[in-house]
Amino acid sequence: MSRAVLGPLLNATPFVDRLVLYGDDIAVAAKSEAEAKDVESVLRSALENTPFGPLTIGRCTIRHRSQRSNFVKYGLRQDQWNPEGPMEACPSARSFERFGERAEARYLAGPMETGKGRVSRYRKAWPKAFPLWKPTEHSLGLLWQTAFEARQNAERSRK
């Protein structure tokens, strides 16, 4: 439905060549904060005046490319050591949060004796859901720490 409704609407905008649409999530690159605010204004106006009824923007953030922007399931930002290079992708903050919740649920999903193995398998498989992410040793260590904390939380909740 988003392609049928939002596609033609967004194709008529002056920034269609800098726009990414995924489901009902929209991201637009802008050269300055002022331009970003103009883009937001144009989007709000276009969505409110659509022939399909007024649509609204649920959540909108304007971020500098050096700050992490969460889009779809990724956190995107400019490499701080290479400001002229490409954007880097890693799992979004919400994705990491869900990882901890699901690791805890997996630990609680069966016998306590095999809980550690279930969480470990999940931790090893989880990065495959993010093919654009190139995890470092440090990020994998943080993932391990999150899994460990999820197991501890699950053990506390079982008592």
Image: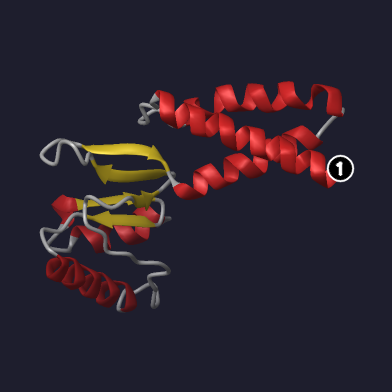
Total numbered circles: 1
| Residue drawn at (46%, 48%) of the image | 93
| Residue drawn at (10%, 39%) of the image | 84
Q: Amino acid at mark 1?
A: Arg
Q: Where's residue 61, x and y in %? A: 32, 64
Q: Where's residue 31, x and y in %? A: 10, 58
Nearer to the camera, 9 or 39 = 39
What colour scheme does the image use? secondary structure
Q: Quadrant of residue 144?
A: top right
Q: Is residue 151 above or below residue 56?
A: above
Q: Quadrant of the C terminus?
A: top right
User: Position of 126 compared to 113: left or right?
Assistant: left
Q: Quadrant of the N terminus?
A: bottom left
Q: Is residue 147 above or below residue 92?
A: above
Residue that badge 1 annotates:
158
User: Position of 48 compared to 102: left or right?
Assistant: left
| Residue drawn at (39%, 73%) of the image | 55
User: Position of 98 compared to 56: left or right?
Assistant: right
| Residue drawn at (26%, 73%) of the image | 46
Nearer to the camera, 158 or 69 = 158
Q: Where's residue 78, x and y in %? A: 22, 43
Nearer to the camera, 55 or 37 = 37
Badge 1 crowding class, 10 Å Cα cut-off, few under 14, some 14 to 19, many 20 or more, is: few
Q: Where's residue 12, x and y in %? A: 17, 63
Nearer to the camera, 80 or 73 = 80
Q: Secondary structure at mark 1?
A: helix
Q: Quadrant of residue 5?
A: bottom left
